[in-house]
Image: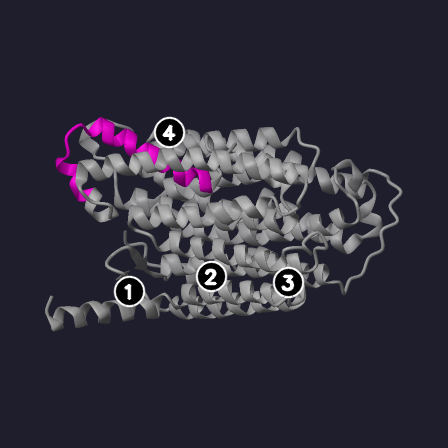
Amino acid sequence: MTVEQLADIMGSIQGSMALSSPELFLILGFVVVLIGGLLRLHKSILALLTLVFITVSLIICVQHLSMPEVMPLFGGMLRHDNFGTYLKVLFDVAALATVLMSWTNSRIDTRVSEYFSLLLGTLLGAHLLTMSVNFIMVFISLEMISLGSYVLTGFAFGKRGAEGSFKYFVFGSVASAIMLYGFSILYGATGSLAFDGISSGLINAEGYTLLYVAMIMALGGFLYKLGAVPMHPWSPDVYEASPMPVVAYFSVVPKLAGLAVLIRFTQTIPVIPESGLASWETVLAVIAMFSLTVGNFAALWQQQPKRLMAYSSIAQAGFLLVGVVAAEHDGLRLALFYATIYLAANFLVFIYLQYYESKGLQSLESFSGVGRSTPVQSIFLLVGLITLTGLPPTAGFTAKLFVFSSLWEFYATSSQSIVLWLLIFGLLNTVVSLFYYIKIPYYAFIRPGAQGLKTNFFAVESLFGLVIVVVVLGLFFIPGLLMGWINKINFAP
């Protein structure tokens, strides 16, 4: 290797490091928080340190949003573009909200440094997964998210937490093994681990049916993180076992990271039309229909808030997939709009579920009468739930309207019957979701109950919730404030 070649390599690495500065700050935060634990720093100091490093990462990501160029990093293992950067902004916002929820959660008072360092580690994995365009980095990133998640699930340090953590580990290990086997088949047939290399290698590869099966196996690992059917059975037990801040975090960050890599995978490695096999649009439409149906109908029978929200997240995964199916008709941009509203609404709901859990409310029926004793918290919780339902005057209505409009445009131009069926399933399931999202408000405002809860409008929950309520209501009337950012995103595969 000549001096000039070595200089080029070092220059490339230096440029990659500069564009990976958010991830470098998360790594630094991971180390600092762990050292803080060794020094026995107070929980508040550790939480503050975590907030600082995540905030720095967020600020840098916001600055990177103005860069429309698509740039390969570290020899093509990662890719920097504003699609991935926008999702990293969402991840960081969700992580900040999780830290704030954890700060006020009395159940998270032991192993605090480990807790916050694991949170930073899974956040780093989500960042890298969103940027990954190589199967090696995809697998490493997924495992970074998964290993930290297994431990965070059991942070309640009880029998139920240990059981949920173990189930999550077993199911995640099987999903990872299936995905890795699919990766190995694709590598053996194409000689490449990069998405671009596999796409070009499949054209001349023999035995395409086997390779198609391998792609479906790889897709299974992404669906596992997305929490979509059939890779969903872990969700209810994990949600029920985990502390509330962890549940809120799981409901958004790993899910959107899985969505990001699924979009990159399906957009870069299309199904060869001449093969006669089902296209990605058809496969994802079927998965979306099952996710919508299973999630919504299973949620109807739940009597615990965490399990209800677990099945809600499965159904919401179906709605996110609708945008991927209609990718050719601005579906991806509208899916990002939907993901942003979903993040805000989900955290709004979990903030107040945590508040009521701290008051001893563990079942839906225990919410009877709380609307009278804690009106502010109950109204904010109601806003979050109707946002998830998709009712006006919240941005949830706008988000679902956008997604269904793109799906209808796709059907109008393609005339694919599966797309029409997906549209029908989506509309019907939106109606079904109303019946379980309205359960808690029904108990809170309609059912009588002797609740002696004291309310404080100036509590952290109320101030934090007020900001989110203003966002979800404001974006209903002025969605262009958010779509203006999203329309600048480059979706070049």
Left or right, 307 with respect to 427, comes to right
Residue under pointer 1 = 69
Q: Secondary structure at mark 4?
A: helix
The amino acid type found where label 3 is placed reads: Val
Which one is in front, 132 or 383?
132
- Measured from the top left, where is residue 450 in percent x and y? 89, 42
Whether residue 26 appears in magenta in the rendering, the answer is no
Compared with 60, 290 (above or below) is above
Residue range corresponding to the magenta coloring: 199-225
Q: CA distance from mark 3 to mark 1?
A: 33 Å
Res 293 visible: yes
Q: Secondary structure at mark 3?
A: helix
Compared with 378, 46 (above or below) is below
- Measured from the top left, where is residue 120 in percent x and y? 51, 58
Compared with 236, 262 (above or below) is below
Q: CA distance from mark 1 to mark 2?
A: 17 Å
Q: Residue furthest front?
A: 38
The amino acid type found where label 1 is placed reads: Glu
Compared with 53, 86 (above or below) is above
Residue under pointer 4 = 418
Q: Residue at x 47, y 70 (%)?
A: 59
